[in-house]
Amino acid sequence: MPTRHSRTPGPGAITAVIALSGIVVSLMQTLVVPIIPKLPELLGASASDASWVITATLLAAAVVTPIAGRLGDMYGKRRVLVASLAVLVVGSVVCAVSDSLVPMIVGRALQGLATGVIPVGISVLRDELPPARIGGAVSLVSATLGVGGAIGLPVSAAIAQGTDWHVLFWLAAGLGTLCLVLVTLLLSESRRLSPGRFDVPGAAGLAGGLVLLLLPVTKGGDWGWTSGTTLSLLGAGVLTLALWAWYETRVSQPLVDLRVTVRRPVLFTNLASVLVGFAMYAMSLTLPQLLQSPEATGYGLGRSTLAAGLALAPGGLVMMALSPVSARITARHGARTSLLTGVAIIGLGYGVGLLLMAEVWQIVVTSMVISAGVGIAYAAMPALIMGAVPVSETASANGVNALMRSIGTSAASAVMAAILANMTMSVGPAHLPSEQGFRMTYVVAVLASVAGLLLTLAIPRARAAAGHAAHTESAASLRDALPAGTGKH
């Protein structure tokens, strides 16, 4: 398909546009963190109801990533990028003009639906860039998942403290519009498509199953982990996803090709991604609270929201700075080694954190070490996935991998909140997380890192993975050669 522009942008411009879009989309995860304590008052709602402002974004992000990936493979990745960014702008404007709970939840859900930009953008890089440039570009864009959240915390804190909170969402709308314009002007449509019929029942089943599963995970602390609502939804989610998997193996053009996802390189990369996502989000949840805890606790550092955000901002810069390092490790030793290195550094960071909790600079060091590991690990995952799936399914496979990270972050949100809520101390009339509670979150994150290491070791080495990729490419070529309407499997 010819490009739609007389001057084709270079690899650097394409990478910059997609990386900027990734940062803006990931900003949505931490955009409202500084105003969480004020949300009940700002929206005239209870604390439990106001928490839906966070939950809606997490659920929407988890649901959309594999669906956006498949739509990109079928109908064009540029179209999906444009649609996703347009939805982000609309959601941001809805939030910017809202003063009540329901429209705020709707707007935040729309912002979450833009998360598909990152896996689809990574697939654009594979389509458009010269082979020598793909590794570094993919590493950079993958790292934006963590970079945007880390940088967004101090920026949003500064805005929330210095002006009206609605400005946060006008800023998001402006950034989304900028990215939308750049994508429209600079990117051409995909030349590699995987035409077919979109699996509507599969999309509905996956979306329903994920909502039923992740909703009690994120709200279990409010509802009670043994309550009938929590257990019923968990059971319904597991059953729905099991039925969805059964259905997906019996249709000719599934939303997710489960025969590809259960191959060792893809399966164990995705399982490791859950734990890396868990470890990354655990840092985002625990370190700000530790920095802001009152000094009267004996361990707290008594910093403001803005100061805490600034203390953690260097971690985001480290993530971005080390993405090229991950690409070089991958080029020389393979993506499996990069992922092993990143997960090991994450575990080391939490281990160091157990010993360094007394000063702000110690928290900064802990954050930077963990962020270094996250940056290297996040950058390695798309390389592992793309080395094991056919080109025609790149966006879909990256979408599933992003979904695995989202499941990890949702699990971290539930587990860390439960630990800190159950290990408390009294400071006057207030009940606050205890020092032992924070240390326990570090221990759990170390255990998650160890499990991630074990799963990464189960990923086949590069030569074996290349064999899987070659087999998959051959199968894809055979399918393409079959007459229209012939079954996929």
Image (cartoon, rainbow, N blue to C red):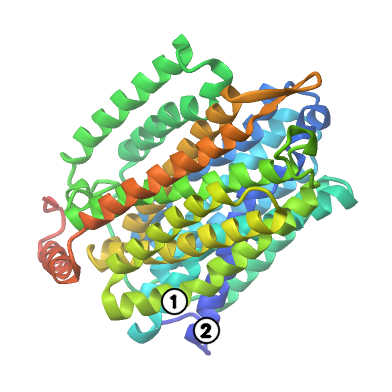
- Does the CB distance between marks 1 and 2 fall below 8 Å? no
Helix, strand, or loop for circle 2?
helix
Residue pointed to by mark 1: 325
Residue 201 place in picture, x, y as percent = 32, 36
Q: Is residue 67 above or below residue 49?
A: below
Question: Residue 298 lies in what quarter of the image?
Answer: top right
In the image, what residue occupies the spot 58% across and 25% down?
423
Residue 391 place in picture, x, y as percent = 27, 68
Q: Amino acid at mark 1?
A: Val
Q: Amino acid at mark 2?
A: Gly
Mark 1 surroundings: few (<14), some (14-19) or many (≥20) residues within 10 A: some
Q: CA distance from mark 1 to mark 2?
A: 18 Å
Helix, strand, or loop for circle 1?
helix
| Res. 12 mark | 2
In the image, what residue occupies the spot 57% across and 33% down?
436
**Marked residue nearer the N-terminal end (1 or 2):** 2
Taking 224 as reference, is 329 left or right?
left
